[in-house]
Amino acid sequence: MAPARVETLSSSGVESIPAEYIRPVEERPTGSVLDLKNAGDGPELPVVDFAGWDKSDEDRKRIMREVAEASREWGAMQLLNHGIPETLIARLQAAGKAFFDLPIEEKEKYANDAANGKISGYGSKLANNASGQLEWEDYYFHILWPHHKRDVEKTWPGYPAEYEEVTDAYGVHIRKLTSFLLGGLSSELGFEENRMEKMLGGEELVMELKINYYPRCPQPELALGVEAHTDISALTFLLHNMVPGLQLFHQGKWITAKCIPGALIFQLGDQVEILSNGKYKSGLHRGLVNKEKVRISWAVFCCPPKEAVTGPMKEMVDEQNPPLFPTRTFQEHIDYKLFRKNQAKKEKAAQ
């Protein structure tokens, strides 16, 4: 029996969402995600202009400083003039949308088996949180890089025909940006530019693509597309279909990221925070849904290989700056975050 899809529920015409999608009161979003008229009254996600990042040393140094500053304060930013052609982004998004526009029975041919650890393919979020609530999201997930770790035939969607071509081309651009950004973050801490990337696997650094599909929700004030979390990755790059929904937690408030045409949202994950011993932030964020529009986002997670060992870099630790994080493999970090969630869920169920 195929698992229930959020899209099926959304298209059924229900006026009230099932109890398992209703978030605890303290987690619920306030107001409408589409109401951004007051967004200018508070802080906004930093915007970094990348013009000249691969041509001018002066621009390169400026960009590195701005990226590091935003990484310390927010753990996230919007990148303009990042070098990825608009035409390629449009084709990438058209291909992803074309897949999700298929009838559900066609998409089910690519269904994953997340309950048994096989997450590549078409799926829906399982309940792995303390409250047991589900997230208002379907998705498609697969490895993007390096080539020898991906299985295009078995785990990438076979429709539309150009999906492989445009997704692979996009991955090449993201891999180049990854090296530049890790180099900048490393040098701004006083290290050689390739230091962080080496510690995160070098050429074996893994990029995973997750297309998030958030159907219309009849009660968006009660639900979340993605619950509040930090990414387990080192870096995350995010594109979206210009429907607002990403929120960052900053200075005690949830701040909605503005939709800026042509921008690429860049977020730091746990691994960079760990390497920097907390000098850079892994930003807490969540995804909202709304009643009027479908939201789609394309997230690329840049992660070390599962056997890679990460911990605070030795130069970041001294008597005044003790290690804030343990040294362990990436797999152990994943298990730790999942174990904490699953343990909390078990404890709540036993009460």
Image (spheres, helix red, strand yellow):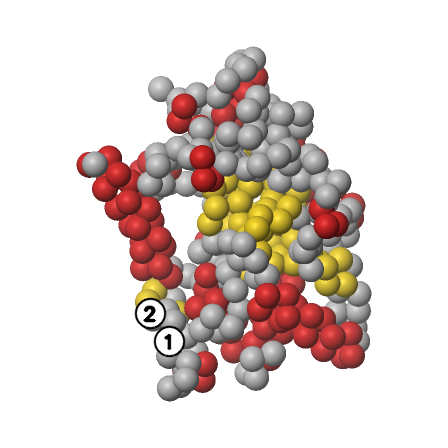
Q: Which label number is shown at residue 69?
A: none
Q: Are marks 2 and 1 in contact (CB under 8 Å)?
A: yes
Disc 2/disc 1 C-alpha distance (Å): 7 Å
Q: What residue is disc 1 on?
A: 323
Q: Secondary structure at mark 1?
A: loop
On the rendered image, what quadrant is the N terminus found in? top left
Q: Give the quadrant of residue 127.
A: top left
Q: Give the quadrant of residue 114.
A: top left
Task: In the rendered view, tell whether residue 344 sits above or below residue 7.
Answer: below
Q: What residue is disc 2 on?
A: 326
Instruction: Tell us which disc is closer to us: 2 or 1.
Output: 1
Query: Which residue of the protein is positioned furthest toward the left in this rendering?
Result: 350
Position of residue 144 measured from the top left corner of the image (x, y, whole percent): 54, 50
Res. 326 in view? yes
On the rendered image, what quadrant is the C terminus found in? top left
Name the residue type under label 2: Pro
- Looking at the picture, tell me which residue is in the foreground, 109 or 296: 296
Res. 160 in view? no
Name the residue type under label 1: Pro
Task: In the rendered view, tell whether residue 312 sits above or below residue 146.
Answer: below
Q: Is 231 on the left or on the right of 217, as rendered?
A: left
The residue that appears at 35% across and 37% down in the rendered structure is: 131
